[in-house]
Image (cartoon, rainbow, N blue to C red):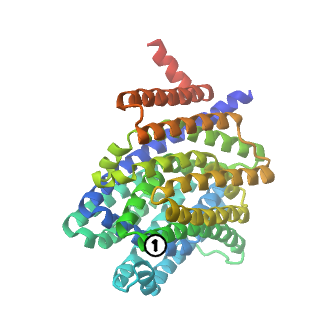
Amino acid sequence: MNSIKNKSSFDDLLKNLSFFGGVEFLNILFQITRSKFVAVLLGPAGIGLYGLYITSVGLISTLTNCGLDVSGVKFISSNKNNIKKFANISNLYKSLIKITAILGFITVIIFSPLLSYFTFQNFDHQFAFLLLSIYVFFTQMGHGNNTFLRGLRKQKSFAKSTLLSSLFTLIISVAFYYYFGINGIIPALVLSSISYFIVSQLVNFENNFSIRRFSIKNNLKDGKDILETGITYSFSGLLIITSSFLIQIFIKHFGSIIEVGLYLAAITIVNKYVNLIFKAMSIDFFPKLSEIESEIESNELVNQQSILSLLILSPIILLLIIFVKPLLYILYSSEFYSISLLVQLFTVGIFFRTMSWTIAYLFLSKGNTKLYFKNELLFNIHYLLINLFAYMFFGFNGFGFAFILCNFLYFIHIYISANRIYSFKVNKDFIIILVCQIIFAIILICINYYSFLGDNINYIISLVIVISSFVISIKNLNSRSNILSNILNKLWKK
């Protein structure tokens, strides 16, 4: 009976992955097309400039939005079945979103001179940052709208909002980059954020609640809980952005703006394209986890999600290692071939994220914000220090080895924390699969980098490894899912 229940739960995760994975795949296609135009029209220097702008205002945005896009999901999903409570939470959340968006807008305006000087060591970009205050305002308002859709688990509405926003951003970006080059970066960002807000507002219209008068005193506790959870997550996000920003400044100081662009291109492939599986799963996984009160059920869901993530990601990562150069050409241009090894090393670090990523949501869903923040603080401190050390002593590819080490250390640390607080134990199957796939990845990187066996033998070995990875994934998915086993049975009969 328990096996049937586990299969049913795994099927739900697989269904959601199929739906949101498809949405994210289309979203990624839009982003790939945009990145291609950026690379061709602006080059590595343009990507570097774009990254510095985004990271700079991202610091302000992350600090001022108080993590409401995450805490909102938790409180909306956990109270959606209580009509009165949900109405109060909704009204309160909307008010907080507007306040934080205005706060972000004003903060960027006030600190625009400092942002320009700290980022570029001059005040020439002050006006650009003034315009980016508009970008911050509408982006935070759009995130607020989409948080409602996630919390309510309005899957189709959220997908519609995401895809339409990505499409309009693509059209706007390509037009401005084509006609204005690097000078088109700022207006493209501003107009894209406005279109993002408009789309999210229209799609979210059916979920809008009229703001009624409600007692501040009665809702003070709800507001405090939402802000406490959100601010903790916000500071955690701020740590990540700060680390990334300091690394970019460090590269620019000891290297060049072109190296910044190359680094951003490599890390973008990991954070946006490879991580699409994580993003697709988090859309429904976090609200679902927030609804569960039982510690045993929560731990089981985390294990299931981790195994599913690993099984889906492993073949994708191995294919990326093999075809990294064609991918770089498609995404950017031949100018980016120099980051092939760096991208391959980054992908190995992703293996360790499959478990640590899901455990991190366990802390948030239980409201254990202090421990979550401590874990993130520790990770970002050693992430920054290890990356700077690796770059100084091992060069550009040192970032890849640093990424692997940092994610491994985080995986160990967060697992120990979850085991101590929630008696969480990792599924043995996960460890077995993880070790096998990492060995496959290391072999592929070695034969791809050194090419000591000759091209033909390398291709044969690579093909055997990828097929083995697919077999492991299909076999494990089949044993855990009724959906996949039914599909395979029908195909086998034919």
Q: Secondary structure at mark 1?
A: helix
Camera sees residue 209: no
Which residue was labeled with disc 1? 249
466 shown above or below 27: above
Camera sees residue 374: yes
Where, quadrant-wise, is the N terminus in this rendering? top right
Q: Is residue 165 left or right of residue 277?
A: left
The structure residue drawn at horizontal position 71% and vertical position 54%, both measured from the top left corner, is: 413
The structure residue drawn at horizontal position 52% and vertical position 40%, both measured from the top left corner, is: 442
> In the displayed image of the protein, which residue is found farthest to the top?
493
User: Hey, which quadrant is residue 5 in on the image?
Assistant: top right
Q: Is residue 490 left or right of residue 32?
A: right
243 shown above or below 289: below
User: Hey, which quadrant is residue 68 in on the image?
Assistant: bottom right
Badge 1 amino acid = Ile
Where, quadrant-wise, is the C terminus in this rendering? top left
Image label count = 1
Question: Where does residue 297 sit, x and y in percent of width and height?
Answer: 73, 43
Q: Residues within 10 Å of mark 1 (few under 14, many from 20)?
A: some
Q: Is residue 299 left or right of residue 203?
A: right
Question: Where does residue 422 sit, x and y in percent of width and height?
Answer: 78, 50
Q: Is residue 114 left or right of residue 408?
A: left
Question: Where does residue 79 sit, x and y in percent of width and height?
Answer: 66, 57
Question: Where does residue 320 sit, x and y in percent of width and height?
Answer: 42, 42
> In the displayed image of the protein, which residue is found farthest to the left?
179
User: Hey, which quadrant is residue 203 in on the image?
Assistant: bottom left
The structure residue drawn at horizontal position 64% and vertical position 36%, both measured from the top left corner, is: 9
* Residue closest to the eye, 453 or 307: 453
